[in-house]
Image (tube, helix red, strand yellow):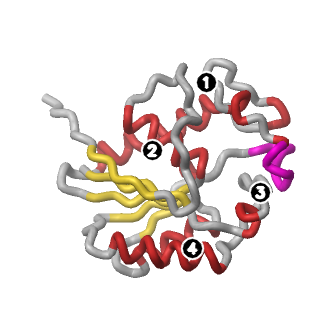
Amino acid sequence: MKIYLVRHAETDANQNHIMQGRSQNLQINENGVRKAKELKEKLKSVPFTICYTSPLLRAWSTAIILVGERVEIKEDYRLIERDLGNLEDKPRNLYDQNKYWDYELNSHDEGVEPIQDIFKRCNSFLEDIKNNYQENDTILIVSHGAVTRCLHHLLKGTNRKKNLLGFPVENCFCQEYEIKKENRT
């Protein structure tokens, strides 16, 4: 099974270094539309079985540009962006990435969703994908920075005690992963 992970296209908040969690349900900007169209061209020959997206507008808009009516787009709440609590709509420099991405610390200061909670919902989502699709299926997942990074680490089997931030996830990031379904007897 192939999985393509995509982070949504750019919004004005991204461009202005403002944190947008769940409450900032923003549309992608002109640059985001352009980048999404460029990515669409790169993915046009990929035979997607289905596309899953976060319920937030910026992810939906990106998914629609990428696959349009070519395949069904399904919303899954487990793909929603990290809840940034009191830090939402604030300048990015107020967000201590090392603190909030420390798996063992699992901080929820300022109402920020704990990192272990994001990993749990991402793992639940991936288990459903593995159980409901076949070896020859190709799944497109359009989500947000934190969720895309967590899904990457789960798909790669990364040690969560290591640097989880060492994997950059820019807007319109796209990476392909291959997973083998386990034989169940």
What residue is shown with label 3? 17
**Amino acid found under the numbered disc labelled 2:** Phe
Task: Determine the secondary structure under disc 4.
Answer: helix
> Which residue is depicted at the point 67% across and 45% down?
82
Tell me if mark 2 has few (under 14), some (14-19) or many (20+) residues whose alpha carbon lies within 10 angstroms of its own: some
Q: How many marks?
A: 4
Tell whether label 1 touches label 3 (CB within 8 Å).
no
**Amino acid found under the numbered disc labelled 3:** His
Report x, y in % for residue 39: 43, 71
Decide: is 158 above or below 178: above
> Which residue is depicted at the point 24% across and 50% down?
1
Q: Taking 51 as reference, is 95 left or right? A: right
The disc at residue 125 is 2
Q: Earlier in the sequence, mark 3 or mark 4?
A: 3
* Along the viewing direction, whichever of 122 and 35 lies nearer the viewer: 35
Q: Quadrant of residue 13?
A: bottom right
What residue is shown with label 4? 61
Q: Earlier in the sequence, mark 3 or mark 2?
A: 3
